[in-house]
Image (cartoon, coloured by chain):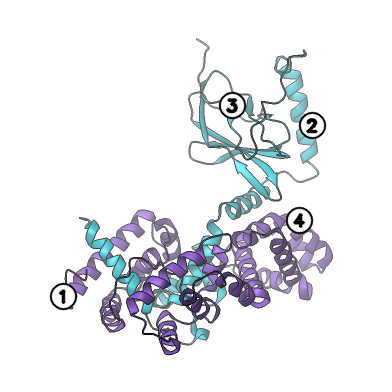
Chain colours: A cyan, B purple
Amino acid sequence: MTRNDHGDKVTMHALREAALIRPAPDHRQSECLKGELLVAFADGQMSDSELLVFTPHLSSCRRCQHELASLIRALNDPEVVRAAKRDERARFRLPRILFPLAVAAAAIVVIVVRPERQPPGPDRQHRAPVLSPGAAPVVLSPVGAVSEAHDLRWTAVQGADSYVVTLFDADGRVLAEADAHETSMTLPDSLNLAPAQRYLWQVQARIGFNRWISSGLVEFRVISTQP
Amino acid sequence: MGEWGDELRSGSTETAWDDFITRYRPLVFATIQHYARDYDDVMDVFARVCQALREDDMRRVRSYLDQPQHTARFTTWLVAVVRNLTIDWFRSRDGRRRISTIAEGMPPLRKQIFTAVFAEQRSHIEAYELICAQASRPLAFREFLIELRETYRAASAGRRGAILRDLSPHDLAVEELDSADPAETEERSRRVEQALQTLPSQDRAAVELYVLEDLSASDIARVLGLRNAKAAYNRVYRALDLLRKHMTTSGLTRGDL
């Protein structure tokens, strides 16, 4: 389809102007779409037959369009998206009673199998330098092509009392998510990162009352160094 | 629904509530904070939301659980409920008072427009006619539109922009309005309306949600059951093309379009 950018803009302008003075709908408010229908529209859960019945009203009623758009704007709020996603992921987490056991088992495996990852000595740095207030966390490693990726490390954020680290595969699926109070996290051994595959990760720092600040999404891939 | 749903069904309302609010507190707070920024406002609305969700043995939540077939995910449903309660709280508790406070800093004409449109929920044309009737000097429609645009800008700015946007019945981008008089604008709008009525309802919904509500193509695709964002985008621009052709043949000149 050939686009007429100027014509489109002018037509949009005419639509906005017309809507500005469009008279009130000639139906009563009681005939407008009920809350449950607007929620179903917003969630994309309308069946074909429901769409056939209710889209004509939506198409001509500014009140319903506005209600629907307002709900969608709330649903698209990054904080709302984050909270909803965390709840959905929580459903797939281990039962509460098993979780401490799993964590303990993972810790034992990390200590026994990779003791070299915990070098003793006074110069071991637990935390990266503290950034200025309000600065987002910055991921340190792994970034880009790396020979191994057992630990995720990032910079500290002043005032942050916890971090949430999320690892995604190249299709955006969440492979791991964990809370941390330090500025590093060891990936669980159960997670096998495939060589040369793209992975993405980010860290979010909690900086106050239900307030989070997020690093950028960073890509890495593990390049095998073995012949 | 998990444990809290089972507890609610078995009648253990107190336990169900504790589990429910522990699990959904972040989502409830995030939704409230979409509209309210002040800490005190957030906490007051949160208290109101908890009261409303808990009353009558969690009647509202039960109404979702009791649906034979859910028409939306629970989190979407909950965001909608919290959104409605938040807006109701602003409207009923201090909407008008707070609106008046915001209007105080505006020049007299914008204050009048603000009161008519935001507080009294009048249409723009109604607001214009009312202000003309009360004015001590003639008010050109063009001047009204310019002031209306500035009033929207002032109202949408700042921390309460989101809630005011929802309190307004019009939520329109009032930009680049250049009409000389209401009769001319009304005539042009009537023809645009006629052109819109020639579109299939799905196309009309797509183009209005895109242009007037500024929704993304992916949101529109989800709402209207289209395959993907590209399908929605194509539908919007095909509709715009049809509208332009229809409006041209109905007498709107190239200058108008």
Q: Chain of mark 3?
A: A
**Same chain letter for marks 3 and 1:** no
Task: Pick out the residue farthest to the bottom.
Answer: B133
Residue A63 in the image: x percent, y percent?
47, 76
Give, as a three-letter code, the residue at label 4: Thr
Using a 10 Å C-alpha cutoff, classify the residue at mark 4 as few (fewer than 14 neighbours), some (14 to 19) or many (20 or more).
few
Horizontal side, residue B63 vs residue B133: left or right: right
Q: CA gap, disc 3 to disc 4?
A: 33 Å
In the rendered image, the quadrant that contains the C terminus of chain B is bottom left
Give, as a three-letter code, the residue at label 3: Leu
Q: CA gap, disc 2 to disc 4?
A: 25 Å
Which residue is disc 1 drawn over?
B249
Compare marks 3 and 2 and give the one earlier in the sequence: 2
Which residue is disc 2 drawn over?
A104
Give, as a three-letter code, the residue at label 1: Thr
Horizontal side, residue B163 vs residue B252: left or right: right
Give, as a three-letter code, the residue at label 2: Ala
Task: Pick out the residue farthest to the top.
Answer: A227
Q: Chain of mark 1?
A: B
Q: Chain of mark 4?
A: B
Using a 10 Å C-alpha cutoff, classify the residue at mark 2 as few (fewer than 14 neighbours), some (14 to 19) or many (20 or more).
few
Residue B187 in the image: x percent, y percent?
26, 82
Which residue is disc 3 drawn over?
A140
Q: Quadrant of residue A35?
A: bottom right
Q: Nearer the viewer, mark 2 or mark 4?
A: 4
Q: CA gap, disc 4 to disc 1?
A: 60 Å
**Same chain letter for marks 3 and 2:** yes
In the rendered image, the quadrant that contains the N terminus of chain B is bottom right
Res. B22 mark: 4
Q: Does residue B130 appear in this view?
A: yes
Q: Quadrant of residue B233?
A: bottom left
